[in-house]
C-alpha cells in the first residue's frame, strides 16, 4: 500500500513540475510580449512588471520542489555507503595473479560440458 | 534468465572468486544460447565463465569458449593471455611461459603478461624469484595497486612483515579511504609489535567504517596491551616501539571502554551463544 501511495505521490510531483515548467514558459512569453509592446508604444522604462517576475520565480521554486520529489529513490553518496557493497574477499582478490594449478578440479567431478563449440 | 545475467555481473564486479556459482549460473545460459541477451557484455560473460571453468578444471568447456572468443577477437592480446591461462590450468606451464615471453617481446608494456609471469613463479613455489620479478615490475608500474597488494601477500607468506607493511603503505597511498587496507596495515603492525601505529590504524578503520567489529577488536586489544606495558614499564629493548608515542593513560582507558561498549552493542542482536562468548572474551 505504501509503495503505491509513494508512486502516486511521485506522479503528482512530476505533474506539478510539468505545470510549473509551462508557467515558466508563459512568464517568458509574457516578458517578450511586454517588451515588444513597450517598444512599439515608445515607453522609456523597460523594467518588467512585478507579476511576470513573480510568476517566473514562483514557477522555478515549484518546479525544483516537484523535480526533487518526483525523481526515484535517492541513494546515499558517502564513500562508506559505497564501500559497504564490497566484501573483504573482493577487496583483497588479485585476479591477475590467480594461480590455476590448485585442487579446484578435484572438488567437483568433471561433467560432460556444455556444447558451446557447436553454436 | 536475465536475473542470472545480473547475478553474474554482480559477481564480476565484486571481483570475488566464486567459480562454482558462476558455472552453475552460466550453464543454462550456454546450453540455451540465451547468453547473447547480455548484449555488449556477452564477451565479458564469456571471459568470466572461461576463468571459472579453468578454476574448476573443466578444460573442455574453457577451450570451447576460447574458440568463440578467438573468432570474435582474432589477434587480441587479452584472448592470447587466456590461451596461456588454459595451458597453466591443464598442466602445461612451459607453453604458457613461452606464450607470455612472446607477448612481452612484441610489446614490453603488456601488463597482464608480466603479471602472469609472476603468478607462474608463485604457482611453482619459487617465491623468492616471484618477489624479485614483481619488485622490478613495480619499479616501472608504481601505481599498480594490485601489484603492491600481491607483493605484500608474497612477503607475508615469507614472514617478512616490515617489507609487507611497506607495500601496504603504498596501497593505502593509492586508495586512502579504503578501510580494508588500513585494517591489514594495522594487523601487520600489531604482529610486529609496533602497537602505537597499530592503535592509530585501528582507530582509522573505525573512523572510516562505522562500528567495524574487527576494527574495534583491534582497538580493544592494542589499547589493553599498551596499558599493560605503560603500567609495568618493561625494559626498553623488549619493546618494538617507544612508549612516548602512545596516548595518555586516561585516553587509553577510555578507548578500551569505548571498544567494549561498541562490541557489546554490535553483538546485541546476535544469538545468545555468540553474545556470551563475546562477553566472556571482553571480561578477560
Image (cartoon, coloured by chain):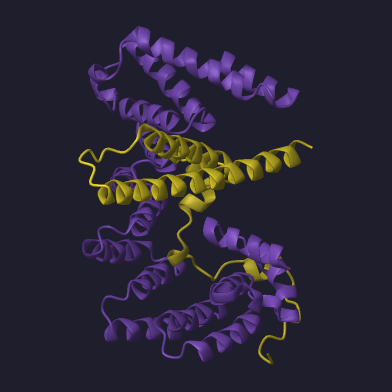
> B86 above or below A6?
below
**x%, y% of residue B149?**
38, 53
If the image is split into quadrants, where does the N terminus of chain A sit? top right
Residue B150 appears left or right of B16: left
**x%, y% of residue A37?**
32, 49
Residue B123 appears left or right of A53: right
**B250, A59: nearer the viewer:** A59
**B80, A49: nearer the viewer:** A49
Residue B229 appears left or right of B8: left
Quadrant of the rendered structure where residue B142 is? bottom left
Q: Which chain is yellow?
A: A
Is residue B20 something one can see in this rendering?
no
**x%, y% of residue B202?**
41, 29
Residue at 38%, 47% (x, y): give it: B159
Q: Colour of chain B?
A: purple
Residue B4 appears left or right of B222: right
Quadrant of the rendered structure where residue B177 is? top left
Quadrant of the rendered structure where residue B109 is? bottom left
> A73 above or below A119?
above
Amino acid at each position: 500500500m505504501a509503495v503505491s501511495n509513494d508512486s502516486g505521490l511521485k506522479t503528482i510531483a512530476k505533474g506539478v513540475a510539468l505545470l510549473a515548467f509551462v508557467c515558466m514558459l508563459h512568464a517568458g512569453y509574457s516578458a517578450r510580449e511586454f517588451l515588444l509592446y513597450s517598444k512599439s508604444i515608445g515607453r522609456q522604462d523597460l523594467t518588467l512588471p512585478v507579476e511576470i517576475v513573480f510568476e517566473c520565480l514562483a514557477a522555478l521554486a515549484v518546479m525544483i520542489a516537484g523535480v526533487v520529489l518526483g525523481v526515484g529513490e535517492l541513494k546515499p553518496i558517502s564513500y562508506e555507503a559505497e564501500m559497504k557493497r564490497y566484501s573483504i574477499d573482493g577487496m583483497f582478490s588479485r585476479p591477475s595473479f590467480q594461480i590455476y594449478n590448485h585442487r579446484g578440479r578435484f572438488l567437483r567431478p568433471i561433467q560432460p560440458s556444455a556444447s558451446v563449440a557447436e553454436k | 534468465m536475465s536475473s542470472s545475467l545480473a547475478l553474474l555481473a554482480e559477481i564480476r564486479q565484486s571481483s570475488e572468486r566464486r567459480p562454482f556459482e558462476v558455472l552453475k549460473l552460466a550453464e543454462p545460459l550456454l546450453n540455451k544460447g540465451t547468453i547473447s541477451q547480455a548484449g555488449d557484455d556477452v564477451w565479458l560473460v564469456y571471459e568470466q565463465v572461461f576463468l571459472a571453468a579453468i578454476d574448476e578444471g573443466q578444460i573442455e568447456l574453457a577451450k570451447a569458449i576460447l574458440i568463440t572468443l578467438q573468432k570474435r577477437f582474432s589477434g587480441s592480446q587479452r584472448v592470447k593471455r587466456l590461451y596461456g591461462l588454459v595451458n597453466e590450468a591443464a598442466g602445461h606451464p612451459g607453453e604458457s611461459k613461452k606464450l607470455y615471453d612472446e607477448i612481452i617481446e612484441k610489446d614490453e608494456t603488456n601488463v597482464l603478461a608480466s603479471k602472469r609471469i609472476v603468478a607462474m613463479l608463485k604457482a611453482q613455489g619459487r617465491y623468492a624469484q616471484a618477489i624479485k620479478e614483481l619488485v622490478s615490475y613495480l619499479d616501472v608500474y608504481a601505481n599498480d595497486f594490485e601489484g603492491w597488494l600481491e607483493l605484500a601477500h608474497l612477503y607475508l607468506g615469507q614472514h617478512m612483515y616490515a617489507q609487507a607493511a611497506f607495500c601496504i603503505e603504498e596501497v593505502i597511498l593509492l586508495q586512502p579511504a579504503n578501510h580494508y587496507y588500513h585494517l591489514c596495515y594495522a594487523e601487520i603492525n600489531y604482529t610486529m609489535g609496533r602497537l602505537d601505529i597499530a592503535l592509530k590504524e585501528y582507530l582509522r578503520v573505525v573512523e572510516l567504517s562505522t562500528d567495524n567489529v574487527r576494527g574495534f577488536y583491534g582497538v580493544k586489544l592494542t589499547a589493553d596491551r599498551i596499558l599493560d606495558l605503560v603500567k609495568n614499564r618493561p625494559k626498553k629493548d623488549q619493546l618494538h616501539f617507544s612508549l612516548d608515542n602512545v596516548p595518555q593513560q586516561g585516553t587509553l582507558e577510555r578507548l578500551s571502554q569505548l571498544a567494549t561498549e561498541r562490541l557489546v552493542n554490535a553483538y546485541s542482536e546476535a544469538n545468545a551463544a555468540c553474545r556470551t562468548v563475546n562477553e566472556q572474551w571482553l571480561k578477560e
